[in-house]
Structure formats: structure tokens, C-alpha cells
Image (spheres, rainbow, N blue to C red):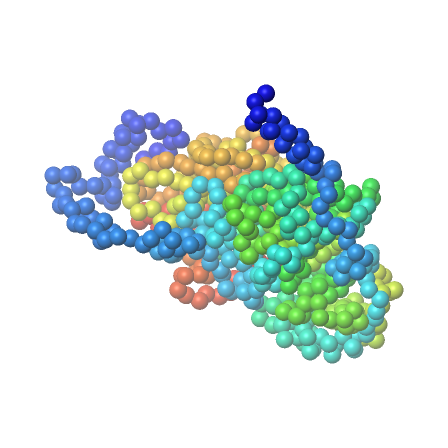
Amino acid sequence: MSRSARSFAVAGAVLLAFTGLASADAVKLGRPALPEEIKAWDIDVRPDGLGLPEGQGSVSQGEELFQNNCAACHGEFGEGVGRWPVLAGGQGTLTSERPEKTIGSFWPDTSTVFDYVHRAMPFGAAQTLQPDEVYAIVAYLLYLNDVVPDDYVLTKENFPTVALPNRPNFYDDDRETTEKAFWKATPCMKDCKPKVEITSHAAVLDVTPDAGKEGDKPAGAVE
Amino acid sequence: MNQMKPGSRVDRRRFLTLAGLAGACAAVGVQPAAAEATPDPDIVNLPPWTQALGAGVNNHPYGVPSPFEKDVVRREVTWLTASSESSVSFTPLYALDGIITPNGLCFVRHHGGEAEIDPTRHRFMIHGLVDKPLVFTMEDIKRMPGRTNRVYFLECAANSGMEWRGAQLNGCQYTHGMIHNVVYTGVPLRAFLEAAGVKPKGKWVLAEGADASAMTRSIPLEKAMDDCLVAWAMNGEALRPEQGYPLRLVVPGWEGNMWIKWLRRIEVGDQPWGQREETSKYTDLLADGRSRRFTFIMDAKSVVTSPSPQAPLHARGPNVISGVAWSGRGTVTRVDVTLDGGKNWTTARIEGPALPRSMTRFYLDVDWNGEELLLQSRAMDDTGYVQPTKAELRAVRGVNSIYHNNGIQTWLVRSNGEAENVEVS
């Protein structure tokens, strides 16, 4: 063995002393999360109430908080200002031409209202409301949607008993059975229909940006 | 008589014959014979860029497109939303080619504005039903074994959502532009879950972002352990801030809202969390008033990007019909194109990589005689799914579902080359 080859072999042996192949099942990276750290971020609330903080709030307390923190966008009674979300009303509209999807008409779970207000509202001042304030605002929203009476006090204890009316009308994705016809073995290639007529023109509405005109606000929205 | 002759395998002789036929009846786009022509000033006159020196190599330390491409930008539809911080801008699909979306043109959807995060202060936590709750820094994440590169499309579930009741927006940027397709660099989410040790009761994970909406979505553990990535790079560079810098979740083939940006937390639980974005939003209201939930997969879809309302045809004769197709269920295996509103179809040429859960580019080389076209494309994937017509979709779902509109798009191309968004019987 030449001198240089020998020194290379020695260096290789030294390297092997602290270098091996890392594998995913033996990751030494990261550190334990502390309980205080988990508590700071784990604010999610589930439909069964898991994750609710201690606290309570009444409809009347909620009304005052809502007028001060929420009404500028959502309206005094949750009716929505401009294109900001409507939070109340809309019962019976889900099969209509213009469904109004509110907490009372559409949302399946009360917990979602609490979770979302607590994590992301007021818009631009997220996570500034205390738990009692969130309980009160949720109580007011439930009152606006005729789910609870005007003297109701929402608490961690009574929370999971408050059900929203549209809850039973949700079901899991069933496209693979109800839309089974879309899995076609041989889609038609020739003479697939006798005639073709235009049934709808985008130019009629004329709402495309850069079109230079301000048309009526059309249906549909990104949600 | 229809002299439009599409062909996916036009040989040179046949192509020339067709061009001759088209030339016989087309006034537009026919070049004058060499004998009658005047010399082209762009050839015979010395242009300034040939005479004088151009800018130096570091004129733009971070390169930008040519000023002549200044119109190729993301655009928003201001009437759609109440504020720009909770809104969407659209990818200019009409001007793009190939399968990769440039980072600066990838559509943007925010719910609480664009978070600006110092990567040295970003943390990623795994907790819940695990043996060891863990915290990772960005440096830790980039040292993880098992780094991978994958090309995936990300499509918002509301893409084409404005078109349920009829043709509404003129341009594939607006009708189909809530999609982009890039190569991600990251580590499988599975590696982090295995490091923490998922308890047997764990069935779902909750992913959370660090932005002002603290965006959350529940994802089945099976998907999280399958192909989800924790990614920090797109198209070879760090994620753009608007795409979740420094860290985002990649959920291949599933609706874009689940691809949590500014990813900071994964919680393991035994049931879904019923978050706002999986209950009041991103559930599909059907005609009977009931709603589907957990419609995560994006079905096969395609669109002709050129010609389209923002990309008219400029001349008769040879033209390339170009478009993109994708499927959240697998790989696009075939795209058919019709020029007559669906009476007759021709299989287009898939060109370039056809990868699972990635955009796929297709072309149809045609010779246009100026006749009006009703142009559509129809994607098929390797599960046998065929992109449905809008009528077929509405028959099952009604018009109120907002999300998952993957119906076949029609462009009316007029004899002057302009295109309009229409629907046909």
C-alpha cells in the first residue's frame, strides 16, 4: 500500500467513528415540546368540546362585545356589511337560488364558532379576546340564530349540549358511488350529439376584470 | 364544410396539403410571395440592441421577466371578496407553457394576509396522541434524512367556482387560474410523525399555520403517513412568502386549502376537529340542501389555455391548441379535444412529463381556416375517470356547491380569432 493510500484508509476509519447513514426511524433531531409550549399553541376546540377553556359568557355581555368588535363587518345583527360574511338568518334558503350559509342555517358545529372566533377574530387583531369574551360572543351569535334564549349563559359545561340545526345534513364524500358514471370505459369520439347550441355567454354578464366596465355583482364567491 | 383538420400525428406532407387547402379559402395570415414583398426593416435596419452594449451581468441580481412580458401577471377579481387580505389572485395560465408554474406567478389565496416570518424564529411542533411531543427549528428540518423532490399541482377547491350557474368570466386566468404546479423540496410528514411516535388511537392530524388566520385543517392520518410533505422550497428556491415561507404542507392531489402555509403545528387526534374551513367552507352544498364533507380529492380536469379569451388566435393556417390537464386521483393518461362543441373528438398529444398529481401539458396541431370553433378539452386519468361535462356535474350536484367544479370548459373562437367563455348544449 502506498503512503498516500494508507493515510487515506486511516482517515476513512476515523471518519466512520462519527459518521453513519441516518435513517428516519432513528432521528435525533428536534427536542421535546414543553407543556407550556403546547398549551400556548393548542387552542383548537372539537365538536365534542375537547379543548374548550374554562369560562363563561352571557348573551347580553356578548351583544356589547359584538357591537364593539364585530359589527363593523358583520352588522349589528350578524346580517353582514357589503361582502363580509353574514352570520345569522338564512334558515330555509339552502335549496333556494341564493343560499345564505350562516351559523344558524348551515354550520354543523357550535365548537367551530368558538374555535374560529378565538383563533382568528377580530379580523386584524387575532387572539386578543379572552375566553370569557369568546363565550359571550358565541352566546350572542347563537341567540341571533334562535338557538338559545336572550338570557342564556354559555359555559364550558353546557357547551356540548348546544346543537346546530343543520348538523344532520352533512355526509361524507360519496363521489365514488354517486358519480360512478364518470368512470367511463370508452368516452364517445365520433358523432356524439346531433347538434350543438350555445346556451350561455360570459359576455352577457360582462364582469371580467380589465373589461373596462363595472357590471352587476354576480353570483358565487370564493369562500 | 369543415376544413378544420386536427391531427395528433400530422406528417409533413399531409400538413402541407392541409395548409394549401386552408390557404385557398383564407385571406388572413397568408404571406405574400417573395417577389412582391418589401424588405423587412427589422432585418435591413440596424437595431439599437445590435449596435450598442446592453446591461451588465448583474443588472438584476434577482432576474425579472422582459419588460415586453409586463402583462403576464397574477390578477384579482376585486368584487369577489371583501378585503384583499382574505382574497385570491389568479395564475395567468393563458400565457404559460410547459408544466411548471414560475414562482412569481403562482396564484395566491390568503385568509389573514401574507405572514412575514423570520425563519430563525419559526418552530414546527408535533404533539397530541404521540409518545414524544417534539419541536423542530428550520435548521433541524433541513437536516432530516429522506429529503425528496416532487412535482405536484395545487388547486383551490373553489377553482371554477364562479362558473356553476353559467359562463361568467372571460379568461382561463379567472375560470381556472386557482392552480399552480411546482417542484417541491421537503421531507415526508411521516418522518416527523414517526419521530414523535403516533399512538394507536391516532386517526387524524390537525395542521396549523402561523399566519393571522391560524389556518387549520383536519387530515386523515392515512394521508399524512402516505405522501404528504413538509416543504421549504419550490422550483429550487425557498418558498415565496405568499406560498408559506419558510414552511408549508404539501397534500398531493387534495384541495389547496389543506396545504397549510406557514406550517407551525401538527396535532394528532382520534377524530376530525370540525374547523371553519372544513365545515362552513369547503363542504359541497347539493341541490337537496344536504352537503358533502371531506371531499378532499381534486377530480380530473383540463382547460385549453390557448386560444382562450386572453389569448386569441392571430392568423389562419397552422396553429397550436395548447392546454393543461391534471388529476388528484393519479396520472393523466389522455386528453381529447373537440373543435365542434363535443360532436367529434381528437386525442391530443401529451408532451413533456406526465407525472402523478401534476399538471400535464397537451397540444393539438391544427390548421385553422377561420371557421368558428367551439373548443373543449376532456381529461382522463389512470383510474378511468373521465372529466364530465358541466351538465353531467349539475345533474348530480345542482349549482350551489361552489367547490369542485371540474366540468368541461368551452371557448367560442370567432372567425376573427377572438375567444369567449360560453356553454353549449
**Farthest residue toward the left?**
B35
Q: Position of residue B154 (x, y in %)?
A: 57, 47
Quadrant housing the N terminus of chain B: top left
**Farthest residue toward the right?**
A157
> From what the image shows, is residue A33 above or below residue B345?
below
Asked whether B73 or B117 is in front, the reply is: B117
Query: Residue A8 lies in what quarter of the image?
Result: top right
Q: Position of residue B304 (x, y in %)?
A: 44, 43
**Farthest residue toward the front?**
A3
Asked whether B338 or B220 is in front, the reply is: B220
User: In the figure, is residue B121 to the left or right of B391?
Assistant: right
> From what the image shows, is residue B279 above or below residue B31?
below
Question: Can the viewer see residue A186 in this picture?
Answer: yes
Question: Can the viewer see residue B341 in this picture?
Answer: no
> From what the image shows, is residue B331 above or below residue B256?
above
Q: Position of residue A101 (x, y in %)?
A: 66, 61
